[in-house]
Image: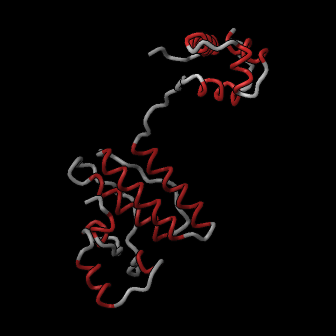
Amino acid sequence: MKIIDSAQALGQASRGARIALGLTQQALAESNGLSRKFIGELESGKGSIELGSALKVAKSLGIIWGAPDPTPQMVLDKAARDIAEELSAGDREFALRLAMDALKYLKTMKPERLKKPRPTGSEQFDALLAAGARLVIEGSSPHMPRWGKKLSAAWFPGSDTRNMGEAFRRLTIKRTPKMFADFNIYIKDNSLEIT
């Protein structure tokens, strides 16, 4: 696979793909809602063409631009940013889903270290990410995160979205992984699907 690292490389790849598909510059232009002149400039490697249109043409030709896989730290940092955004919009339920999805993904990555992400704007969600970071690192590294603060009052994230009876609370406490209980967060292990 050829690496596209310049306007010239994109132009060459575009021209080759267009010819392989049996398309004229005019036909390719029309199918993308662009001018033939744009296609000519793209194929000649002109560096000042509009990126959005170039991406559109590349996609239509089956040219895929790769990006590096995210690092575990990038996943955690993005989760914290997204959670903060959802919390500011008042959507705690979706913020919790984002946190759980990020923790599940991190568990598959088997990170060795995670640094403290930026604050989410909620002590509860900050503690949730800290506890989750410890849980996903447990067993794959001796470098447990030292950041995060235990909540002063017990938090049952499930109670943010539904009514929890006393029997369900007791069951949740019993089935909460230690890393979360250490932070005074109570969430059933099967809710996490990451243990």
User: Which residue shows up at 70% across the image and 15% down it?
Assistant: 42
Q: Residue at x 36, y 73 (%)?
A: 185
Q: Residue at x 61, y 26 (%)?
A: 60
- In the figure, 179 relative to 7: above or below? below
Quadrant location of the N terminus in the rendered image: top left
Q: Would residue 85 appear left or right of 186 to someone viewing this image?
A: right
Position of residue 154 measured from the top left corner of the image (x, y, whole percent):
38, 80
Residue 72 versus residue 10 in the image, above or below: below
For residue 65, above or below residue 190: above
Q: How is the image coloured?
A: secondary structure
Judged left or right of residue 171, residue 127 is right
Residue positioned 30% across, 61% down in the render? 193
Q: Quadrant of residue 81?
A: bottom right
Which quarter shows the C terminus?
A: bottom left
Question: In the image, is 25 to the left or to the right of 20?
Answer: right
How far across and down, in percent of the image, does residue 75 sit? Answer: 44, 47
Relative horizontal placement of residue 136, taking residue 10 as reference (left or right): left
Which residue is more in the foreground, 130 or 107? 107
Locate residue 90: give its quadrant.
bottom right
| Outermost residue, left side | 139
Q: Position of residue 77 (x, y in %)?
A: 48, 50
Number of disc labels: 0
Instruction: Between residue 51 and residue 22, name the one nearer to us.
Output: 22
